[in-house]
Amino acid sequence: MMKLIRHNLPFLLFSLALCFLLMTGCANYGRQGKLSVPDVRPGFPAGYLPLDAAPNSLFLLPPPPPPGSAAIGLDEDISRKSLALYGSPRWVLAGSDADLSFPHAAGTFSCTLGIPISEEETPFLYILLRRTMTDAIISTISAKNYYRRVRPFAVNQAPVCHRERKTDLNKDGSYPSGHTAIGWTWALILSELDPEHSDAILARGRAFGESRLVCNVHWHSDMIEGRLMGSAVVSRLHANSAFLADLKAAKDEIASVRVKKLQPARNCTEEAAALSRHFITIP
């Protein structure tokens, strides 16, 4: 037990700070005519889930694949294949997917939905994406800190999408993939909001996680378990009244924007062409 606590001390300290913010800051939500919540760190607002309700990745996930196993062999094979996309349009899109800053990240699913997603046009959907991103990140922290898995680029010495982020990535465990948990959380929520386009939304959510392989910053098994954590987060969110209220408001916003016939700000033709390249099909 002491070993477990020692490995997770950074997470526990972060949790205490986050808990304080959640208890003291969320009263500002919805005041002054706009949707706002306090940041738990710059760029990351408080999530919907109390810390004691967040899924625990260390409890839910098995250990990463051990050396010499068939699973690690699959990780290495897929990593080699994904490196073949270096410099391609799919590589460029993967670099874009890596950017979780807002408003940029809000547009990830705009082509799939066929509408712009912005703080101005869809404020409830915008804050829904931001808050659930925090929930998804928190769900992965305990396993990341415990296993401290080495990332692919540290093994193969190949390029990554954002070279300036390598130092920070080296400090953060690879297992499970936080970006994948975020993307899959968003995909599940958006497919509920827009069931007519659910297949396309889920496919984009899958591709968002695969972008981490293309960027050479995660292993295949990191991505698979990241999806599981995203699913766990969405399951817990459906017991949260604030989330359910924002979900309903976001659904109304999508319908309203569609009536206005507003178009996504992104180049959806280029995005579709990039997504047509897949590392699994590379010889």
Image: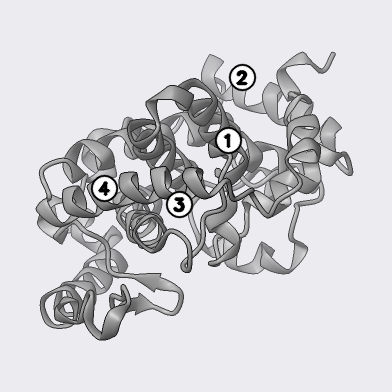
Label 4, secondary structure: give it.
helix
Q: Report the quarter where the C terminus lies.
A: top right
Query: Which three-letter amino acid code belongs to the residue tagged 2?
Result: Leu
Is 198 on the left or on the right of 104, as rendered?
A: left
Upstream in sequence: badge 3 or badge 2: 2
Q: What numbered label is drawn on residue 247?
A: 4
Q: CA distance from mark 1 to mark 3?
A: 34 Å
Q: Residues within 10 Å of mark 2 (few under 14, many from 20)?
A: some
The colouring scheme, among rainbow, by chain, secondary structure or one colour, is: one colour
Query: Which three-letter amino acid code belongs to the residue tagged 3?
Result: Arg
Q: CA distance from mark 3 to mark 4?
A: 35 Å
Q: Which residue is mark 2?
A: 74
Q: What numbered label is drawn on residue 112?
A: 1
Q: Which image quadrant for residue 191?
A: top left
Which residue is at the front of the view, 9 or 280? 280
Query: Which three-letter amino acid code belongs to the residue tagged 4?
Result: Leu
Q: CA distance from mark 1 to mark 4?
A: 18 Å
Asked if labels 4 and 3 touch by Cβ distance under 8 angstroms, the answer is: no
Up the image or down, 79 lies above or below 161; here it is above
Of circles 3 and 4, the one toward us is 4
Q: CA distance from mark 2 to mark 4?
A: 38 Å
Q: What numbered label is drawn on residue 148?
A: 3
Is 219 on the left or on the right of 259, as rendered?
A: right
Q: CA distance from mark 3 to mark 2?
A: 20 Å
